[in-house]
Amino acid sequence: MPPPTETPSTPLAPYRVEQPGFEGPLDLLLRLVERNSMPITEVSLAQVTDGYLRRVEQLQAPPEEMSYFLVVASRLLLIKSRYLLPRAETETPDPSAEDLAEQLRTYQRYRLAAAVLREREGRSCYLQLLPPPVPEPTSTLMSLPLAALERALRRSLSRRVVLPKGPPVVGVRLRLADVAARAEQLLRREGQVTLQQLAGAGASRPETVVAFLAALDLVRRRKARAVQDGLFAPVFLYPVGEDGG
Amino acid sequence: MRVDLDVLVEALLFAAGRPVTPSELASALDVPRGEVLDALCSLRETLIDRGVRVQEHADEWQLVSAPSAARTVERLAGLPTPQRLSPASLETLSIVAYQQPVTRAQVEAVRGVDCSGVLGNLSSRGLIEEVGRSEAPGTPILYGTGFEFLRLFGLETLDLLPPLPEIEGAPPSR
C-alpha cells in the first residue's frame, strides 16, 4: 500500500500511475475505508466521501468506465448529506446508505475470497501428460524406390500439355493519364464534373475504378478539389483556382 | 470382491487419462453404478495424501497429480508456470466460483463495474464455462467453473473450496 496522501495540498498523480490496480469504484471505496481501518458503515462511508471524490476527479477513464464511479459518487454524496444534516427523530434509516454499505461488505467478502484463492493459485493438478498414441502416417509413397519416383517424374514432365483454346485476350486500353487529362479538359470547359460523368454512363468496373483513381490523382496534384454532400451523394470535382481554393 | 473393484476403478481412471463418468466405468466393469460410486469415493479417501489424487466435477472423475507436486511436474514436462490472473480476473472468478450458476449481471452487481471483458478472458482460459441459461428476462447465460478451475487451484472437488470469508464487525444483514 502506498503511504496515505490525504492532505489536499498534495496533488495526486493520475490513478493508473499511482494506484496501478484499482478495479472499479467499489475497490477504490473499500481501499479508502480499509485505510482508516473502520468497519463498513454509513458513518465510515460518509467519512471517506471527500477522499473518494478527490480520486474520481483525478481519474482518467473512458466515459463508460467513469459512469460506474459517478454512480457510486452520487450515492456517497447522498449518504454524506444525510449524515451532516440534522435528521428528524421520526426519519427512517436511509435505505440507499445501507444498500451501499451492504454492497461494499459483500464485495469485501469476495475480495477476501479472491485473496484465499490467490494463495492456492498455480498449485495445479495435472492430468497424465503423455500424449495419446498417434498412428504412424502410412503412405504408399514410403515403399517406392527413388528410381521409380524419378521415372514417374520424367514421364509426367514429358507429357505434352495442351492448353484449351479460348477467346484471345485483349488488353484494356484505359489509361489513368488519359482519364485524368479528360477530366482536366472537362473541368476547364464546364467548371465542374461529377465522378459519374467521368466514368461514363453505364461504366464497367474497371472504368469506374480508373475514374476514381484519376479523381484522386487530380486532387493529389491540386488540379481539382472534390466535394461530396453526403454518404453516397454524387462526388463533384471543381477546378482549383489561382488562390488555391 | 470389494477390494478388487477399488483396484479396477483405480486402474481404469489411470488408463483413461481423461474424465470418465461412473456410468461409463459401470458399463466397462459390468457392476451397478452405485458400487462404482462407492469405489470412487473410497479411492478418493485412499489417495488423499498420495502423489495422485481423484478429482471430481459434475459427475466426471479423473486422476491428477497432487497440487504440492505442481512445480516438479512442470519442470519434468517443460511446462511454463501458469500465468497469474489479474486482480480483476481473480475477483470475478471467485464470485463465479462461490455463486455459481451466476449471470453476468449478478457478477457486476457485486463488483460494481462492467465485467464482460473479464468474463470473456476467464472463458477463453477455460476457467469458467457456460452452464446454462437463466430464466430471467433475456435468458442470460449462466456461468460456472469447470475442471480447469479445480486444476489451477489444486482442488479435488468444488466442495473443498474454502468457505466464503465472513467479515468481522459487520452488522447482521437485514
Image (cartoon, rainbow, N blue to C red):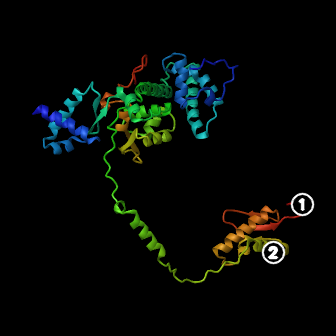
> Residue A241 falls in which quadrant of the image?
bottom right
**Residue at (33% x, 30% y) in the render:** B155
- Residue position marked by numbered label 1 in the rendering: A243
Badges 1 and 2, same chain: yes
Q: Is residue B99 visible?
A: no
- Tell me the tag on residue A186: 2
**First in sequence: mark 1 or mark 2?**
2
Residue B10 lies, with reference to residue A214, above or below; the image says above
Judging depth in this view, the residue of B139 and B28 nearest the camera is: B28
Residue at disc 2, secondary structure? helix
Tell me the quarter of the image containing the N terminus of chain A.
Answer: top right
Judged left or right of residue B94, residue B112 is right
Judging depth in this view, the residue of A170 and A195 nearest the camera is: A170
- The x, y position of residue A113, in whole percent, is 41, 26
Judging depth in this view, the residue of B14 and A75 nearest the camera is: B14
Judged left or right of residue A63, residue A239 is right
Judged left or right of residue B130, residue A26 is right
**Residue at (21% x, 44% y) in the render:** B24
Residue B166 lies, with reference to residue B117, above or below; the image says above
- The x, y position of residue A229, in whole percent, is 72, 63
Chain hosting mark 2: A
- The x, y position of residue B26, in whole percent, is 17, 42
Q: How many numbered marks appear?
A: 2
> Residue B102 falls in which quadrant of the image?
top left
Tell me the quarter of the image containing the C terminus of chain A.
Answer: bottom right
**Residue at (78% x, 63% y) in the render:** A219
Residue found farthest to the front: A147
- The x, y position of residue B67, in whole percent, is 35, 28
